[in-house]
Image (cartoon, rainbow, N blue to C red):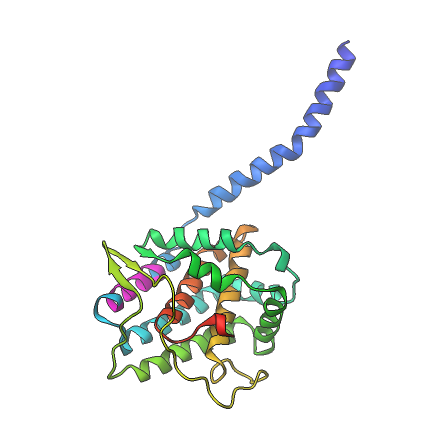
Amino acid sequence: MEKMNRRAFCGTSLLALPLMSVFAEEKKNKACSNIPDPIMDVLSDEFAKTTFEGARNGFGAEHFRQYAGHVRILDAHLHAKGTNKKLDKKLDEDDYHLLDPDRTVRMTTEYWKKHGILINENKLREQISFDMDSYGLMKKAIKKRGGVRSLHESVAEALERKAGESETVVFRGGPIIRNGNVIFPDSGNPPHQIKPADFQLDFHSFIGVDLDCLCKAMAVEGSVLALMCVLGCVPCCAPSAVLLALETLMNSTGVCDPTLC
């Protein structure tokens, strides 16, 4: 009897080990999610400040230049953390089946609520719900054009170009302030700038190509970062939210529409 009890206890303990491991991993991930990242905190605060100012007074050249600066700071931070290198490796992986747009939307919107920015969930879900072929092609395009650092610089250059176009014209009609929060449009897109006539898919840089596809590349990168975050890459969590919010901002201010790529 004693022998059987000992066997039963050991068997039960062995069965419990995987479950205990899962609980331990979840506890570890929860603890890691609270690890502070001062640079990302400041960057997110600055992004929110710029967005509030633009929503209140209209988006002018200074706002788009500030966003370009945010992108370059984000890129430098991701480079220092080694995240850009990890991202470039992810471009070769077949991970489409692991994407979870609903979870990505939830993570992104909850992140920005803390900063007083309310992103429409349906709109964001539309922009990151890729079909398998376009997702794979976009990852290949990012890699072919130099990886995510090239993408980040091209986004910054696109925002600088938008700033040049906004020296005398203030953009209104995008995000608005309501009840103390920035609200992004629920639906519809303002007219955006004409695509360059000489667009070529194999162009060496993102700048000068279809800006709709530039923003779709941002949406893809943001989704990959969100996936990496879920899989345990803590430094990927906040950057994912920042990149997806920036892409949403560019969409709502008429720079691009990723659904047209």
Q: Nearer the viewer, residue 148 or 117?
A: 117
Q: Is residue 47 magenta?
A: yes
Q: Nearer the viewer, residue 128 or 44?
A: 128
Q: Is residue 41 above or below residue 152?
A: above
Residue lying at the far top of the rendered structure = 1
Magenta: main secondary structure: helix
Residue lying at the far left of the rendered structure = 57
The image quarter containing residue 135 is bottom right
Residue lying at the far bottom of the rendered structure = 198
The number of numbered discs placed on residues in the rendered structure image is: 0
Image x and y of residue 3, in percent: 78, 13
Residue appearing at x 47%, y 42% in the figure: 31
Tell me which segment is drawn in magenta.
43-54
Q: Quadrant of the N terminus?
A: top right
Q: Nearer the viewer, residue 109 or 9?
A: 109
Image x and y of residue 35, in percent: 43, 48
Q: Is residue 242 above or below residue 144?
A: above
Residue 56 in the figure: left or right of residue 220? left
The image quarter containing residue 137 is bottom right
Q: Nearer the viewer, residue 155 or 209?
A: 209
Image x and y of residue 65, in percent: 32, 76
Q: Is residue 231 above or below residue 30?
A: below
Q: Is residue 172 magenta?
A: no
The image quarter containing residue 69 is bottom left
Residue 252 in the figure: left or right of residue 195? left
Residue 204 in the figure: left or right of residue 170? right
Residue appearing at x 25%, y 81% in the figure: 169
Image x and y of residue 47, in percent: 33, 64
Residue appearing at x 31%, y 68% in the figure: 174
